[in-house]
């Protein structure tokens, strides 16, 4: 059916194992959207992930039909910075540029100066011509950047967070490390600052994959959504990967199932669209990210 309908299936690193195995590409949100742009022949993109990622794919691929298998797959972090809240913060700090994590809804992206991912957030902020920056919605990522720059980072809202990455505890990781002292601890910057403190490596999911492939260590403790472990194990069969917390599941990411993907392609539902005016402004913020991060 994928071939017949000229469709490609893109799956986020946090998707269920069987979806990752069926996907044409597995990666983080921006990697997947850029892949989609390169797929000139595709008519349909089935984006097995959450709402804001499918919206980003729709913004970057206006001539393709973007399908989200489960309409219930909504990222709670993206919902923490609605447009009105963003406008209030911008009015409080006139002239201060706004950098938004891609984990935001399209209408918020359209109101910001530049977007970023967890992989390029620091580079984007450093290359931005400003001493003070409004940054949202993830406070933990904002603090990660603040510790690495002299610029003033103002988190908006004050306490935005990912409920899944909030589950990791320093003590759990310490105990896992006691069982395997040679294990390397990889932590996502959406984790709390005290969990980041005990990391050997802090990075996005794609950076973790690259690090695990080149690092000489044999075992790793991984503090991010457990879906990434499937990809890490597949790409590095000779290495061991343990979750820092076995129940660190994103229930929204896991709403997508093989059955829903089948139905989505069969019925060509649920089509994700972004109003043209919003998409044009949001696309500019995303393109600016690629420029500031020195990538296309
Ligand atoms: S893992 Fe966190 S940031 Fe990612 S989709 Fe789930 S709730 Fe949102």
Image: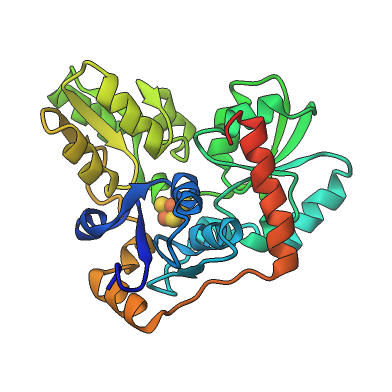
Give coordinates of residue 46: x percent, y percent. 39, 66
- Compared with 71, 81 (above or below) is above
Question: Can the viewer see residue 85 in this picture?
Answer: yes
- Outermost residue, right side: 94
Which of the two residues, 226 or 11, is positioned nearer the viewer here?
11
Which of the two residues, 33 or 176, is positioned nearer the viewer here?
33
- Compared with 190, 157 (above or below) is below
Q: Is residue 129 left or right of residue 15?
A: right
Which of the two residues, 79 or 283, is positioned nearer the viewer here?
283
- Compared with 182, 261 (above or below) is below
- Compared with 176, 166 (above or below) is below
Q: Is residue 194 left or right of residue 99?
A: left
Give coordinates of residue 266: x percent, y percent. 32, 81
Give coordinates of residue 199: x percent, y percent. 36, 24
Colour scheme employed for the rendering of this structure = rainbow
Q: Residue at x 28, y 20 (%)?
A: 214
Q: Residue at x 35, y 20 (%)?
A: 200
Give coordinates of residue 71: x percent, y percent. 44, 75
Report how many numbered discs are placed on residues in the image. 0
The quadrant the N terminus occupies is: bottom left
The quadrant the C terminus occupies is: top right
- Outermost residue, bottom side: 267
Q: Is residue 84 left or right of residue 69?
A: right
Q: Residue at x 17, y 25 (%)?
A: 219
Question: Can the viewer see residue 163 in this picture?
Answer: no
């Amino acid at each position: 059916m994928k071939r017949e309908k000229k469709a490609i299936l893109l799956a986020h690193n946090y998707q269920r194992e069987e979806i990752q195995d069926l996907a044409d590409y597995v990666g983080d949100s921006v990697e997947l959207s850029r892949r989609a742009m390169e797929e000139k022949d595709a008519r349909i993109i089935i984006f097995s992930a959450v709402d804001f990622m499918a919206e980003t794919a729709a913004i970057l691929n206006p001539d393709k039909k973007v399908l989200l298998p489960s309409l219930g797959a909504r990222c709670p972090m993206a919902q923490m910075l609605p447009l009105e809240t963003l406008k209030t913060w911008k009015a409080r700090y006139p002239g201060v540029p706004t950098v938004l994590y891609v984990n935001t809804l399209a209408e918020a992206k359209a109101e910001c100066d530049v977007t970023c991912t967890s992989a390029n957030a620091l580079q984007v902020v450093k290359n931005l011509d400003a001493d003070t920056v409004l940054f949202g919605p993830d406070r933990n990522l904002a603090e990660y950047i603040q510790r690495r720059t002299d610029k003033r980072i103002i988190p908006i809202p004050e306490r935005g967070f990912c409920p899944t990455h909030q589950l990791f505890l320093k003590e759990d990781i310490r105990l896992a490390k006691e069982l395997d002292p040679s294990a390397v601890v990889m932590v996502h910057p959406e984790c709390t600052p005290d969990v980041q403190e005990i990391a050997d490596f802090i990075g996005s999911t794609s950076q973790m994959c690259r690090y695990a492939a080149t690092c000489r260590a044999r075992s790793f403790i991984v503090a991010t959504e457990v879906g990434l472990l499937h990809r890490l194990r597949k790409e590095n069969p000779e290495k061991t990967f343990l979750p820092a917390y076995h129940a660190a599941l994103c229930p929204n990411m896991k709403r997508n199932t093989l059955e829903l993907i089948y139905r989505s392609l069969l019925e060509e539902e649920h089509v994700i669209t972004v109003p043209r005016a919003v998409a044009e402004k949001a696309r500019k913020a995303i393109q600016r990210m690629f420029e500031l991060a020195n990538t296309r």
